[in-house]
Image (cartoon, rainbow, N blue to C red):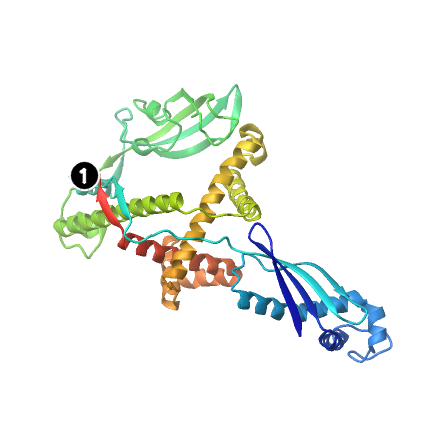
Amino acid sequence: MAVTTIEKLDNNEVKLNIEIEPSVTSWEYDKACQKIAKRVNVPGFRQGKAPKNILEKYVGIAALQREVLDSLLPTIFENAIEENHFDLIMAPNVESYEFKDDNTLKVTARLELKPEVNLCEYKGMEIEIEEFKNSEDTVDKELKILQDRYATLNEVENRNSIETDLVNIDFDGYVDGEEIKGGSAKNYVLDLAHSNFIPGFAEQLVNHTKGEEFKINVKFPDEYHDEKLKGKEAEFNIKLNSIKEKILPELNDELAKKVNPKFETLDALKEDIKKYCENAAKAENEKRIASKIFETLFEKININIQETMINREIQALMGEFKQRVNMQGGNFDEMLEKEGHQKIYEQMKEEALRRIKNSLIVGKIAQTENVSVTQEDIQGKITEIANVYRTTPENIIAEIQKNVNLLHSINQQIITEKVTRILIDNAKVSYK
């Protein structure tokens, strides 16, 4: 049917030179004519009945030849990939094709292969990390957070605001005499003890009375996301509409039941918090172990990654970066100009190399360890994602049906988690 010769190129590429004999192409060409004839309406002929020579004039010989290629090449590529155990990054790229006068078809295609990964010994690695430990008062701190969450609010009439109050304010801000875009609000409720405003903003709302109008001055951080406001001095007009104080509940069995009816006593709640904190500490230490393992693997394993692969990953990272900047209200083009295209590119390239290398190492270990993804794994991960986004597994499945790349991403997450577990379980860990 077809003769395929393989030419190895640099940069993890191979060239396929394919020659398909006339009898095959002639048969496929006739089939293509019949197929296209059923899809088009040729004037003067019933659908599907137009003769070959008329059809060639109506749709063009090139269109019929492309139909032949679409029919023949997938099987030829599949056979070549399977016989030679090629591990492709992308679908084959047809560089050229030619139908000879005798109907012989010659095709040249290029395949981009995954870089070869020669693993070092990844089991029994000696890893030293700084151990994360919960402080002795961790449970008490968590209980204080719960007290704060279940606190009641009382209106304050007879005193100035203090740093633990919640205040309702109107405000508008100015930089260099110009109003800050998005820097004003009416009836905004701000928790003075847990403010995420500009440093110094909440602090200056302390020791003021209800109904008071006053000005405060703050400075935007040097690393602020909006380029126009970085490091700028700003003035805000404030009107203090109301003050509310928090009344914390007592630490008792009643509070425990409010947190969750399954806790009959405060001691039961404390025990649950203790277990949660122990599991969180364990997870943090495993995260540190995994990070150190991959850091060591990166140092020991050299991989020849082609520029085309790196550039595609940089483009993907750049798209993510642009989306984040725009979501934060920044201007992507202005940021590129200010930070410098070359600087941003180098940062992206470093991250791209890290991502690619991580993916290749994980893939190779998964292949070596025969790691697979089961239907139960996928269902479990979908449930996990649904819990994170506070939705249902059915909604996540609906999103996957719209975008098949999400399923690929879920598969990769599962494989990475399984490989990471193998590495952690087989590491020799010592703690600083």
The quarter of the picture where the N terminus appears is bottom right
The quarter of the picture where the C terminus appears is top left
Question: Residue 323 location, x and y as percent?
Answer: 52, 42
Q: Nearer the viewer, residue 151 or 311?
A: 311
Q: Which residue is rendered at x = 15% and y = 43% of the image?
A: 251
To which residue does mark 1 refer? 135
Question: Residue 401 location, x and y as percent?
Answer: 50, 63
Residue 293 vs 235, above or below: the answer is below
Q: Is residue 392 visible?
A: no
Kind of residue at disc 1: Ser
Q: Which residue is rendered at x = 48% and y = 63% of the image?
A: 398
Which quarter of the figure has residue 218? Answer: top left
Indicate left or right for 281 with 18 as reference. left
Q: Please tell me whether mark 1 sits on a helix, a strand or a loop.
A: loop
Which quarter of the figure has residue 425? Answer: bottom left
Q: Which residue is rendered at x = 49% and y = 26% of the image?
A: 229
Residue 430 vs 230, above or below: the answer is below
Question: Residue 66 location, x and y as percent?
Answer: 73, 66
Indicate left or right for 98 with 177 as reference. right
Indicate left or right for 351 with 109 as reference. left
Question: Residue 290 location, x and y as percent?
Answer: 32, 48
